[in-house]
Image (cartoon, coloured by chain):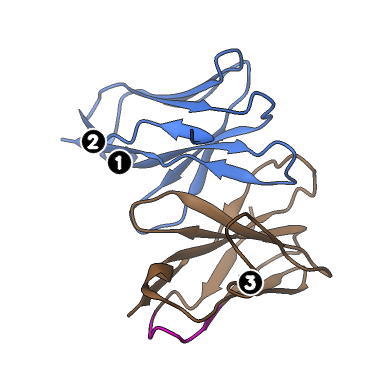
Amino acid sequence: RKEVEQDPGPFNVPEGATVAFNCTYSNSASQSFFWYRQDCRKEPKLLMSVYSSGNEDGRFTAQLNRASQYISLLIRDSKLSDSATYLCVVNRVGGYNKLIFGAGTRLAVHP
Amino acid sequence: SAVISQKPSRDICQRGTSLTIQCQVDSQVTMMFWYRQQPGQSLTLIATANQGSEATYESGFVIDKFPISRPNLTFSTLTVSNMSPEDSSIYLCSVDSSGRAVTDTQYFGPGTRLTVL
């Protein structure tokens, strides 16, 4: 089983739609959680950290459920510019500053 | 956030040769990391580059194949040795300047796209 699992997609949605991505992780002792965004042929960039209380940044909302070892990302009012691959990232327990990346979920927003 | 540059941005190499990739950061950072992203795949950590000591390699990666240097707190190199077509990938360096045991976040360089013929 992979340490971090995501639905690879692609998710094809129209502009203005709401879309949700899910991610599960295998190590219950993981402490830090992130969503990164990667555009085609570009490096990954931090989108947002994920906290147990849930956090929101504009149209983006991230949730963490430690009991289910589940992370989600909700994008409201999708824009064409949201088209990218979204990477779920978890820190490796016992590893100093090591991150484990999910395979990513592709999102394509169309007019 | 740190500004990271990598050289070269891309290269096409013959099998059996070696390529050294450079990573430069605009500020001193504690941790530098090297990742590989194969076509259509996510990122895999190769090693953690520590200043003043040997790099720490992940399972499946060895120093003979991927020697790493970290001469100071702003610079690191990764060499891909005795290349084969299977080494064709994007190689990315990243930094974490927090210095804490549990990572805060990492910032990535633009990557080096390597094609081995």
Chain letter for brown, please.
Answer: B
Q: What residue is rendered at 33% in x and 36% in y?
A: A8
According to the picture, the residue beneath numbered tag 3 turns out to be B24
Give the percent coordinates (x, y) of residue A24.
Answer: 49, 25
What letter labels the chain drawn in blue?
A: A
Q: What numbered label is drawn on residue A109? A: 2
Quadrant where the image shows the C terminus of chain A: top left
Position of residue B15 measured from the top left corner of the image (x, y, whole percent): 40, 83
**Chain bearing mark 2:** A
In the current view of this chain or complex, which residue is farthest to the top? A67
Which amino acid is tagged 1? Answer: Ser
Q: Amino acid at mark 3?
A: Gln
The answer to whether residue B40 is left or right of residue B91 is left
Compared with A12, A85 (above or below) is below
Q: Is residue A104 above or below residue B34?
A: above
Give the labeled residue for mark 1: A83
Query: Is residue B19 covered in magenta?
Result: yes
Does label 2 or label 1 sit earlier along the sequence? 1
Res B32 → quadrant: bottom right
- Crowd around label 1: few <14 · some 14–19 · many ≥20 (10 Å): many
Disc 2 to disc 1: CB gap under 8 Å: yes
